[in-house]
Image (cartoon, rainbow, N blue to C red):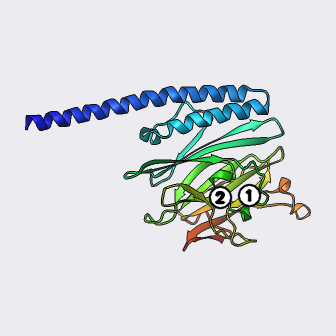
Amino acid sequence: MKRRILIIIVLLLTGIATRAQDSLVLRSGEEAVQALLDKCFAADNDAERRDLSGKAVEQLYQLLQFDAAFSYKFDLLKNVSSVYSDDGAVRLLTFAVPLNNGKKYLYHGFVVHYDEESGIKVTKLTDDEKKTRNPQFVDMQAANWYGAVYYQVQQVGSRRNPVYAVCGWDGADLFTNRKVLEQLTFDDDFIAKFGGSFETEHSDGLHRIVFEFTEKAVMSLQYDPRLKMVVGDHLSAPAQFVHNPRYYGPDLSFDGYYYEKGKWHYEEDVDVTLY
């Protein structure tokens, strides 16, 4: 009996020591990543910013392989957005590097999936840098990622077959900003997959929804648990500028997008005061 208790104590102490060591490694690595990002944002040319941010990404990727990294706060990484899904299985880390060619950004990101049996799976996201025209109609995955800073991830599918709604911000150029609504799923190896089937007021079968509007406006887009849908400001423009996103902005009405039977459905004029 004493021997069994001793073995349990040794195992517990070993586990505590391992977690403490992992925390020290993560803290040291986090400091190194932020140092690279500080140099990146201070650099005065795009080539250097790309190089330094790329090095920061590689170091962060190595840190995210630790199981302890999933719950580690990374609170020193002041430039990195970190959000968890409501079911606690997914973590998204994204950030934007400003470039000097107008108000444009280079985006970096990771999707981290945690499963008790298989552990951590990290998917690195590579910014397409908007080379793909009309991304709403194109299948874009981790290797040619749309590129955005994500601020919300919400499970909308069943627990058995989880589907996630992801909301993000994209600073398009000097004149417009964008919001994006993505669908995130995982294959059998827990590798992140983007894209779904969306309908809007004008189109059907889109891979994602991209909203573009004047840089002077602020658009809301987030999952509303009361309505069980993603709700966003409806964007409109004066009749003479209906094809120019520089003139689009919220018109005080709201649209909704809800997931049902494998597809995202559009609902116009949502009453956000209903509940």
Asked which secondary structure carries label 2, the reply is: strand
How many callouts does the rendering have?
2
Quarter holding the N terminus? top left
Q: Is residue 195 left or right of residue 121?
A: right
In the picture of the structure, the residue carrying the numbered disc 1 is: 211
**In front of the other: 20 or 244:** 20
Mark earlier in primary sequence (1, 2):
2
Give the secondary structure at mark 1: strand
Amino acid carrying label 2: it is Leu
Quadrant in which the C terminus appears:
bottom right
Q: Residue at label 2?
A: 181
Residue 23: assigned label: none
Residue 212 percent location from the top left of the image: 77, 55
- Place residue 138 in its image quadrant: bottom right
| Residue 145 visible in image | no
Corner quadrant of residue 198: bottom right
Answer yes or no: do the residues labelled 1 and 2 have beta carbons within 8 Å?
Answer: yes
Density class for disc 1 (Cα within 10 Å; few <14, some 14-19, many ≥20) is many
> Residue at coordinates 81% horizontally, 57% vertically from top-left?
248
Mark 2 burial class by Cα count in 10 Å: few <14, some 14-19, many 20+: many
Question: Which residue is situated farthest in the right direction here?
Answer: 240
Residue at x-position 67% and y-position 64%: 207
Residue 101 in the image: state x and y as whole percent: 83, 38
Residue located at (21% from left, 32% from top): 10
Where is 53 relative to 182, above or below?
A: above
- The front one of 10 and 166 is 10
Residue 265, image quadrant: bottom right
Is residue 111 visible from the viewing direction of this image?
Answer: yes
Where is residue 149 shown, x and y percent of the image?
65, 46
> The residue under label 1 is which amino acid type?
Phe
Determine the CA span between mark 1 and mark 2.
Answer: 8 Å
> Residue 72, image x and y in percent?
46, 37
